[in-house]
Image: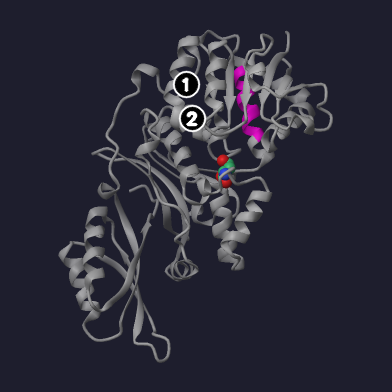
Amino acid sequence: MKPVKLGLLGVGTVGASTAMVLKNNAAEIARRAGRSIEIIQASRRAIGSGMPEGCDNIELVADPFEVVNNAEVDIVIELIGGYQPALDLVLQAIANGKHVVTANKALIALHGNQIFAEAQRMGVNVVFEAAVAGGIPIIKSIREGLSANLIESVAGIINGTGNFILTEMRDKGRDFDDVLREAQELGYAEADPTFDVEGIDAAHKLCILSSIAFGIPLQFEAVYTEGISAISTEDVVYAGQLGYSIKHLGIARRTDKGIEMRVHPTLIPHKQLIANVDGVMNAVLVQADKLGPSLYYGAGAGADPTASAVIADIIDVARTITTDAQNRVPHLAFQPDQIVDIPILPITEIHTAYYLRMRVEDRPGVMAEITRIMGDKEISIEAILQKEPEAGVTQATIIMLTQKIREQQMVDAIEAITELPAVHGAVHRIRVETLDGD
Ligand code: HSE
């Protein structure tokens, strides 16, 4: 059978690794795909940098549109990233009847509905395993491996850079900026690293996971997003003393009223496996009605792990190229006419527990004032920790854990507590998730 011909857009960290792995593992890949797979043309902005060693048989061009318009190319591999020109290139490739493999989560999260509609119309595949959790086959697992189940929730550490930063700060007391610089050097961070630390990258990925899990349209703008930049070493230490780790989680949960989609720092009990996922590693915990909980763990960023997911997609497309388009796996896991609109809940309507840290006057009655407010707002307290004031200081730090409540109750309670004359400064709040499936 004749080889499957690829056109590669972008020869950066992941693009170069994809070319190298396709070359080095060519025989094994051909055994799996049933035919050989070769890159025939690649585009690179810095064309003078050439192709990686041993890949100089691949024609290199500066204009990516030359690749998507190349009649010889069967599958376009989009590894440029960002919204434009990636969107125009992908739409052009689809219009030309080519299948597309992409690692571009921003593109899928924001423009996926349009891209998949065009792909459906043209009868081509657009696949994106590498867009979520790097090398972990989480898309395939949810879309195909769990297709017998009603998915109840998905909770994941889905940004390697953020997890790397939190881990290094906790274990080595390293400075935020210093760790971020290292993540950039290692090729983990986004071109704009605020996407990593402010949770935008994780929100892109959560938006994609939610569509795959619940059969809803991609709706990035509905994801509540909070980054890690406000987390202090103090919170990391206190959380540890209470038996929790602070992780930056993406959570999508089906409730009776709608779907929660949120990205924020979260306290997780140490006993949960996911609380022990450190460094650049990612993990996704899926609650499904028949399987129960299952955890997917692996490298969430980096050249070879991401290339591993890109190439798995290429092999899948190579296998289905001979299959009739109506019988292929649907882009968003559900048949296009079965994508439904379920309301997405505002953050004030979500239910979760809370960790609170506040600075208060160390005198009788203050704790009673605070707990009275909590009682008035029908918030039940799970644990209280009062730190001894330092010598000569009249203020003490109070840490509280609450039971699960509606976010609006917490918002109201924090507002009332902050107004107490005995409370100094802000009440710091981090959501707590036990992740035990309730
Ligand atoms: N910047 C991303 C991360 C790369 O750190 O997880 C993988 O998507």
Q: Quadrant of residue 215?
A: top left
Image quadrant for the N terminus? top right
Instruction: Residue under label 2, please give it.
Output: 108
Expressed as whole percent of the image width and height from the top left, the position of residue 92 reads: 55, 16
Q: Which residues are magenta?
A: 307-317
Expressed as whole percent of the image width and height from the top left, the position of residue 228 reads: 47, 56
Relative horizontal placement of residue 385, taking residue 313 as reference (left or right): left
- The answer to the question of whether label 1 and label 2 lie on touching residues, with beta carbons closer than 8 A, is yes
Q: Nearer the viewer, residue 219 or 42?
A: 42
Q: Residue at x 35, y 17 (%)?
A: 337
Label 2 lies in ligand 1 vicinity (Cβ under 8 Å): no
Q: Nearer the viewer, residue 299 or 199?
A: 199
Magenta stretch, main secondary structure class = helix
Relative horizontal placement of residue 158, taking residue 366 as reference (left or right): right
Q: Residues within 10 Å of mark 1 (few under 14, many from 20)?
A: some
Label 1 lies in ligand 1 vicinity (Cβ under 8 Å): no
Relative horizontal placement of residue 392, taking residue 185 as reference (left or right): left
Q: Label 1 is placed on what type of residue?
A: Ile
Q: Quadrant of residue 27?
A: top right
Return the mark for residue 115. Answer: 1
In this rendering, is residue 250 above or below 229?
A: above
Q: How is the image coloured?
A: one colour
Q: Decide whether residue 384 is among the magenta residues.
A: no
Expressed as whole percent of the image width and height from the top left, the position of residue 304 reads: 69, 38
Q: Is residue 14 visible?
A: yes
